Image: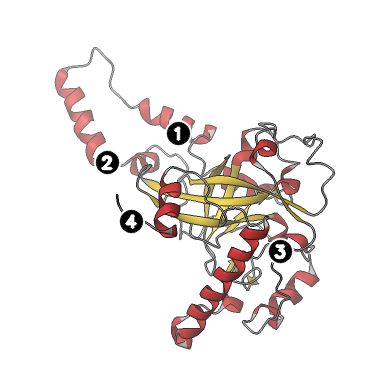
């Protein structure tokens, strides 16, 4: 018999891609109480650091002239999903306002605020695959935020961490949406690029030394370099000037409650909660794509969510 506590039990659940109660169920009374305790721990840890070595939440660069973290940086700020996001001049005023500083005082309760509901597993399993606007009858009448627990899989490099912000693809900026879709490994543009690269392969009846030379060249040359030589548009990488920025606050749909590098899958995986009501307009395979941004960082990562 091996001794184990809550941390070990939670880690085992994470490695098997299973949610852990109560941390991954913030819409319940126990889950909300857990979130409040974690907020206090993270805030104390943040405040104990020297001012020069801690994140200045109001200075976080989100791109497009936007500055300031959305909500409390050390928390999964579910109350932000209840508030109507500001647009236009109101959005700029909100960014420049000091309301995102650590001195912000919020009412603390031991149960979720009115308007935050959590789907039980039986209700989540009845959600349609394409997430069409016709939600089940037991979900549609609920007002406010309707949370469902999902698994987050990063489609590129990067690891989701607790309190990371989850965005849907932008519905008001088609160009930004197209840029994020171009990063998906299953997009048609990438498949066509691979096809064009494969066209440079020698014919089957070519001499043996031609095949050997092509094999040696393909092993020494990366796919990205081959794209450049073939005249194919380069896929932007994180940190590049043409890398897409994260959408606005209106696209915020949830937070990561548990996240780390999953040893079983060999990639960054997270467990989080999404607001179903903000996904009604999403259809097809694109409905499963999302953008993950670590709290205090401006860089986003393309990811896929799956129901648990």
Q: Residue at x 47, y 55 (%)?
A: 259
Q: Earlier in the sequence, mark 2 or mark 4?
A: 4
Q: From the viewer's perspective, is 288 left or right of 207?
A: right
80 to the left or right of 189: right
The answer to whether 73 is drawn above or below residue 208 in the figure is below
Mark 1 or mark 3, which is nearer to you? 3
**Extreme residue toward the front, this view:** 1
Rate crowding at label 1 as few (under 14), some (14 to 19) or many (20 or more) other CA atoms within 10 Å. Answer: some
Q: Are marks 1 and 4 in contact (CB under 8 Å)?
A: no
User: Residue at label 3?
Assistant: 111
Q: Marks 2 and 4: CB-CB under 8 Å?
A: no
User: What's the CA distance linking mark 4 and mark 3?
Assistant: 32 Å
Q: Residues within 10 Å of mark 2 (few under 14, many from 20)?
A: few
Residue under label 2: 221
Residue under circle 4? 3
C-alpha separation, residue under disc 2 versus residue under disc 4: 50 Å
The disc, 1 or 4, on the residue closer to the chain's N-terminal end is: 4
Q: Which residue is mark 1?
A: 193
Q: Quadrant of the C terminus?
A: top right
* Crowdedness near tag 3: few (<14), some (14–19) or many (≥20) residues, C-alpha within 10 Å: some
Horizontal side of 171 relative to 207 (left or right) equals right
Contact between marks 4 and 3 (CB within 8 A): the answer is: no
């Amino acid at each position: 018999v091996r001794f184990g506590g809550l941390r070990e039990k939670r880690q085992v659940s994470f490695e098997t891609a299973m949610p852990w109660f109560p941390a991954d169920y913030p819409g319940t009374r126990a889950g909300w109480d857990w979130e409040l305790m974690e907020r206090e721990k993270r805030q104390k840890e943040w405040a104990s650091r020297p001012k020069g070595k801690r994140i200045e939440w109001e200075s976080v660069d989100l791109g497009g002239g936007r500055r300031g973290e959305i909500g409390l940086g050390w928390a999964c700020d579910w109350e932000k999903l209840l508030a109507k996001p500001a647009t236009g001049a109101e959005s700029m005023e909100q960014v420049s306002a000091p309301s995102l500083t650590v001195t912000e005082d919020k009412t603390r309760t031991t149960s979720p605020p009115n308007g935050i509901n959590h789907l039980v597993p039986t209700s989540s399993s009845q959600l349609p695959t394409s997430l069409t606007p016709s939600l089940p009858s037991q979900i549609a009448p609920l007002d406010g935020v309707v949370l469902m627990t999902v698994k987050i899989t990063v489609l590129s490099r990067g690891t989701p961490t607790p309190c990371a912000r989850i965005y849907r693809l932008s519905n008001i900026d088609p160009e930004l949406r197209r840029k994020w879709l171009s990063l998906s490994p299953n997009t048609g543009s990438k498949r066509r690029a691979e096809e064009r690269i494969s066209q440079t392969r020698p014919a089957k009846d070519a001499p043996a030394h031609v095949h050997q030379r092509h094999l040696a060249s393909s092993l020494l040359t990366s796919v990205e370099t081959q794209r450049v030589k073939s005249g194919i548009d380069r896929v932007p990488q994180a940190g590049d000037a043409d890398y897409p920025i994260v959408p606005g606050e209106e696209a915020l749909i949830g937070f990561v409650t548990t996240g780390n590098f999953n040893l079983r899958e060999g990639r960054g995986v997270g467990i989080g909660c999404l607001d179903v009501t903000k996904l009604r307009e999403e259809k097809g395979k694109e409905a499963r794509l999302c953008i993950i941004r670590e709290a205090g960082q401006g860089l986003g990562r393309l990811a896929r969510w799956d129901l648990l």
